[in-house]
């Protein structure tokens, strides 16, 4: 019966993903979500099936599999036995598998991984923190860009993390991002080849900023940061500072006072703010800051397992702003910022923000909390003018708009419309523009207020459009 239920789930999940096959970013959670606040894309709770999803991506690998995971803990007969089988099968069929793990963690699962797979443990000296990354890169160097996949989020590879603890997974299908992750992997590995080079490998404070931070994936702006070289805490705080309407956070280890003060500042500026923190952080200063400033909008998780997420959601209720999600392995601590190896992504997208909000709302309600319903756009529409010239007419329009750009170099351009419910209509997605004078007409789907969102390699536009 259990096998039949799992088969039915996989079939349903396959149908769901096939229907959205053009989506290059996917999000999964392992606890109940609240789809009642969905703006069109429902958050997915796949508790009990994260291992199956991970296995599916391992099985699709053709050439390379680079794994950097803090802890890989397996028990006989448990879900991770199948993960181990998938990794060993990949190695047997010729996939070049490389594995970096935290040298001070148990990583009991590694004992059952094929002994021919090269692996490297992080330093265990007192001056180093931990190799806390949680990512896997599939086929980064494939000649077919669609092969390249990055798996990340907050989830370590253990049964508890997959099924009991609160975690999230985000999966990108993007060659440029995969190359950036692989470059970071190679810096720790000390080499670009199959064998590690301990003489040249760099961990923690010895790493350098490789400068690969900004990407356009499926028409969405994505930022990528690694700790400690990239100053991740400053990006957490700057993301908090962009909030205009509402802000939510869910963090396992929260000890950084500057991050806490940034949240309090947002609330004092009129931003509706709520958060969840694991009981592990209850003895640190940010806990008292949150309890005294957020009141009932702050919840401490004291249940079974861990509240292991490390995410921030900004303006899911304000598509006129810059809705975003920040997630990854980076806890909000000084050690994560200055000593540990960590990975963080920031996804600028109304749909992503709403999907994570559905998950946060489900978690918050499970802890006995109630959240207010926040709607409508902020008064001011932020505009970032980074190209040399821009034109939009007529505005107000009557069904058709004309968009003109003068670019300073050939590049990819994406254009979409977002209505006040957060639904996004892609007008063009990642089209290469070799002519630096761009002029195009687009139909608007229905009457109403929209945000015209233009993404270029030089920067973004957010412009209010009215269709009468």
Image: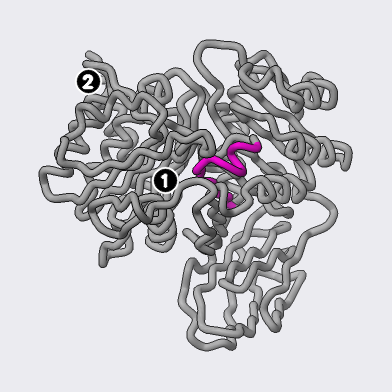
Q: Quadrant of the C terminus?
A: bottom right
**Of the numbered discs in the image, which one, if any, rests on residue 171?**
1
Q: Which residue is mark 2?
A: 4
Relative image position of residue 79 (x, y in whole percent): 28, 22
Residue 117 is drawn in which quadrant?
top left
**Which segment did they paint magenta?**
334-347
On residue 66, the disc is: none
For the question of whether residue 317 can be seen, the reply is: yes
Q: How many marks?
A: 2
Q: Does 339 lie within the magenta span? A: yes
Q: Is residue 87 left or right of residue 281?
A: left
Q: Nearer the viewer, mark 2 or mark 1?
A: 1
Q: Residue at x 35, y 53 (%)?
A: 199
* Residue 110 locus on image (x, y percent): 26, 30
- The image shows residue 462 at horizontal and vertical percentages of 70, 64
Looking at this view, is 184 or 121 the one in front?
A: 121
Asked which secondary structure carries label 1, the reply is strand
363 left or right of 6?
right
| Magenta residue check for 427 | no
Depth order, front residue of 149/191: 191
Position of residue 288 relative to residue 133, above or below, is above
Q: Residue at x 18, y 32 (%)?
A: 85
Please say if 315 is above or below 194. Answer: above
Give neighbour class at mark 1: few <14, some 14-19, many 20+ (Cα, 10 Å): many
Q: Are marks 2 and 1 in contact (CB under 8 Å)?
A: no
- Quadrant that contains the N terminus: top left
Point 64% across, 81% down: residue? 405
């Amino acid at each position: 019966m259990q096998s039949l239920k799992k088969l039915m789930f996989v079939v349903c999940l396959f149908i769901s993903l096939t229907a959205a096959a053009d989506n290059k970013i996917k999000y999964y959670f392992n606890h109940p979500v609240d789809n009642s606040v969905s703006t069109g894309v429902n958050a997915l709770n796949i508790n009990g099936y994260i291992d199956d999803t991970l296995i599916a991506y391992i099985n699709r690998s053709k050439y390379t599999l680079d794994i950097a995971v803090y802890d890989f803990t397996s028990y006989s007969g448990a879900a991770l036995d199948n993960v181990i089988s998938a990794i060993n099968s990949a190695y047997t069929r010729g996939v070049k598998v490389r594995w970096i793990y935290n040298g001070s963690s148990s990583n009991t699962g590694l004992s059952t991984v094929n002994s021919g797979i090269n692996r490297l443990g992080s330093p265990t000296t007192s001056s180093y923190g931990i190799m806390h990354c949680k990512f896997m890169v599939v086929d980064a160097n494939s000649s077919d860009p669609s092969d390249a996949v990055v798996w990340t989020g907050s989830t370590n590879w253990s049964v508890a993390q997959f099924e009991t603890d609160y975690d999230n997974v985000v999966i990108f299908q993007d060659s440029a991002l995969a190359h950036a992750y692989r470059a970071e992997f190679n810096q720790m590995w000390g080499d670009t080849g199959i064998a590690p080079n301990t003489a040249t490998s760099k961990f923690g404070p010895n790493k350098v900023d490789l400068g690969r931070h900004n990407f356009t994936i499926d028409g969405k702006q994505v930022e990528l940061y690694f700790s400690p070289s990239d100053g991740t805490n400053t990006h957490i705080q700057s993301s908090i500072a962009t909030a205009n309407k509402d802000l939510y956070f869910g963090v396992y280890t929260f000890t950084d006072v500057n991050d806490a003060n940034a949240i309090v500042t947002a609330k004092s500026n009129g931003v509706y703010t709520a958060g969840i923190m694991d009981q592990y952080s209850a003895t640190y200063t940010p806990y008292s800051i949150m309890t005294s400033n957020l009141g009932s909008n702050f919840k401490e998780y004291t249940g079974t397992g861990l509240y292991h997420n490390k995410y921030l959601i900004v303006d899911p209720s304000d598509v006129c702003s810059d809705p975003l999600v920040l997630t990854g392995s980076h806890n909000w601590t000084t050690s994560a910022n200055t000593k540990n190896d960590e990975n963080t992504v920031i996804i600028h997208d109304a749909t992503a923000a709403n999907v994570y909000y559905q998950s946060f709302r489900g978690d918050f309600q499970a802890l006995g909390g109630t959240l207010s319903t926040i709607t409508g756009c902020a008064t001011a529409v932020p505009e970032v003018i980074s190209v040399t010239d821009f034109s939009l007419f007529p505005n107000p329009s009557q069904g058709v708009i004309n968009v003109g750009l003068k670019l300073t170099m050939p590049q990819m351009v994406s254009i979409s419309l977002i209505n006040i419910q957060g639904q996004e209509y892609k007008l063009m997605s990642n089209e290469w523009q070799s002519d630096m004078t761009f002029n195009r007409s687009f139909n608007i789907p229905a009457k109403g207020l929209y945000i015209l969102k233009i993404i270029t390699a030089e920067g973004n536009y957010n412009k209010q459009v009215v269709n009468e």
